[in-house]
Amino acid sequence: MVHGDDNGLVLPPRVAPIQLMIIPIQQKKPGVLEKAEAIMADLKAQGIRVKLDDADKSPGWKFSEQEMRGIPLRLEIGPKDIENNQCVLVKRNDGTKMTVAIDENLGKMVSELLEQMHEEMLLKATQHRDASTHEVKTYEEFKETLEKKGGYIKAMWCGDPECEAKIKEETGATTRCMKDELTPHSDTCVYCGKKAKHIVYFAKAY
């Protein structure tokens, strides 16, 4: 959910069941499917989770399905690509297209690209999380931040369920997680003013 966009899922490469989908272009032309199968076998032998989409559907339909399912990489191969001993790789996370040679380095390059994509996605998600997290000390700050900025609110809490219930009742925000290993930014509970025991992240469900 963190990485998804308007086209569907965007799965991190390390957890994606299929890391790369091979989509043959003009697959009924001689040699296209055979070349796609050879590439698939080579990549599988190098530990990449790869699948070949040889369904009788248009490439555009296959592209959309692959994007919706969040498969990290797409490899396109057609007659002209075969002539030039190349293929096209498309990254799901940002849509970047690149033409690369089909040689003994293809598997190594795909593995490195998947790792690069994983790090790009982690960095983007971390930056978005940090930009959407707001630290508050008072209940007035809490309510104002929730109304004007939304996102996550980092606040101190005394541990009393009644305070938690009141915050939910008055603002709609609920606790999402506690991070007691962090350094407290205040000594008092954001709601009641008593001694704080926990660092809590609050947020509204939408």
Image (cartoon, rainbow, N blue to C red):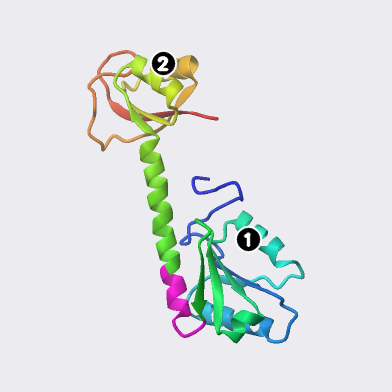
* Image side of residue 78 versus residue 71, left or right: right
Vertical relation: 165 (above or below) 60: above
Q: Which numbered tag is attached to residue 66?
A: 1
- Residue at (31% x, 21% y) in the render: 158
- Residue at (54% x, 48% y) in the render: 4
* Image side of residue 198 versus residue 62, left or right: left
Circle 2 packing at 10 Å, graded few (<14), some (14-19), many (20+), is few
Q: Is residue 73 visible?
A: yes
Q: Position of residue 106 (x, y in %)?
A: 47, 79
Disc on the earlier residue, 2 or 1: 1
- Residue at (31% x, 24% y) in the render: 136
Given residues 84 and 20, the one toward you in this image is 84
Figure quadrant of residue 111: bottom left
Given residues 57 and 95, the one toward you in this image is 95
- Mark 2: which secondary structure? helix
- Mark 1: which secondary structure? helix
Given residues 18 and 111, the one toward you in this image is 111
Vertical relation: 125 (above or below) 183: below
Q: Amino acid at mark 1?
A: Gln
Q: Position of residue 193 (x, y in %)?
A: 28, 13
Given residues 30 and 201, the one toward you in this image is 30
Vertical relation: 158 (above or below) 3: above
- Region of the chain picked out in magenta, as a range: 102-112
